[in-house]
Amino acid sequence: MSILIENLSKTFDSKIVLNHINLEIQTGYLVALLGPSGSGKSTLLRIIAGFEKPNKGSIWLSGKKSTHIKIQDRKLGFVFQDYALFPHLNVFENIAFGMSIRKTPFEIIKQRVQQLLQLIQLESQSKKYPFQLSGGQKQRVALARALAIEPEVLLLDEPFGALDVKVRKDLRLWLRKFHDEIPVTTLFVTHDQQEAMEIANEIIIFEKGHIAQTGFAKELIEHPSTSFVKDFLDL
Ligand SMILES: Nc1ncnc2c1ncn2[C@@H]1O[C@H](COP(=O)(O)OP(=O)(O)OP(=O)(O)O)[C@@H](O)[C@H]1O
């Protein structure tokens, strides 16, 4: 699914958080939204997901105007920073949750959860509860749960933010590899330059509610368009 953002603005209590954003994301890309804290990255992701409404502008998903479409009709998977697995459900049940509420037949659920467990390399942990898993394992389960409903877009908001450096690095590489195998259009919020450079096809740099520059890592490094981009990328 491609994403087109047209002239989008958002204010909270008269504070402009997103200011005339225009953006096009190609189907199958893994795109990083990179920028300092408070620059509006999460707000844009939440608007694309349908958790927030823009004050102005529109969102097109696969060529269809979707600004006012309900969250459940957007075919999106969402993963936040803090795992947010259901604590009273085991790994299998957590991954199966979205399919269960859509009344998917149990045989199909079982098959799909099995495939996802294989993908996240947690086949032997399906009966465990979230409190019995490490941070990295919980985050892989959260990704599997988001993927279970076969979303056309995956929205990841600092998904590895709460993890230690080593686990974070491993998961980054895992996500890159995973995306090569299953190229779901993915938007990934981070404030970590290295993380964005390592995993994204394309990087969008935010500065105080507007887009400072968009490009491949190499382009940004070789031709930063402003002193803000240059400083932020530590060039
Ligand atoms: N629901 C809300 N009500 C009021 N202000 C909000 C709300 N959500 C976000 N903001 C404000 O909007 C601005 C942008 O926040 P946002 O979370 O989008 O930034 P961010 O770039 O994702 O930052 P971070 O990396 O810290 O998550 C901030 O000043 C924030 O305080």
Image: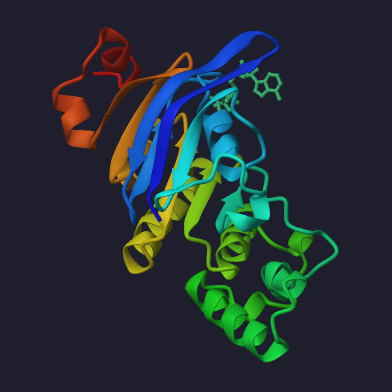
Residue 158 visible somewhere in the drawing: no
Q: Residue at x 59, y 28 (%)?
A: 54
How many numbered circles does the render carry? 0
Could you say where residue 121 lies in the image, as x and y percent from the top left?
Answer: 52, 73
Residue 224 position within the rendered picture, expressed as x and y whole percent measured from the top left = 21, 19
State which quadrant residue 72 falls in. bottom right
Q: Quadrant of the C terminus?
A: top left
Toward the bottom, the furthest residue is 107
Q: Is residue 92 above or below residue 233?
A: below
Viewer-proximal residue among 131 and 201? 201
Q: Quick one: quadrant of the N terminus?
A: bottom left
Instruction: Locate residue 126, reporting x and y percent.
Output: 68, 77
Residue 79 against residue 108 in the figure, above or below: above
User: Can you tell which quarter of the image residue 111 is in?
Assistant: bottom right
Q: Nearer the viewer, residue 225 or 193?
A: 225
Up-down: is 217 above or below 231? below
Question: Farthest front residue?
Answer: 65
Q: Residue at x 51, y 78 (%)?
A: 118
* Residue at the spot 36% in from the left edge and 62% down from the top edge: 183
Residue 217 visible in the shown view: yes
| Quadrant in which ligand 1 is drawn | top right
Q: Residue at x 57, y 12 (%)?
A: 16
Residue 87, image x and y in percent?
A: 82, 59
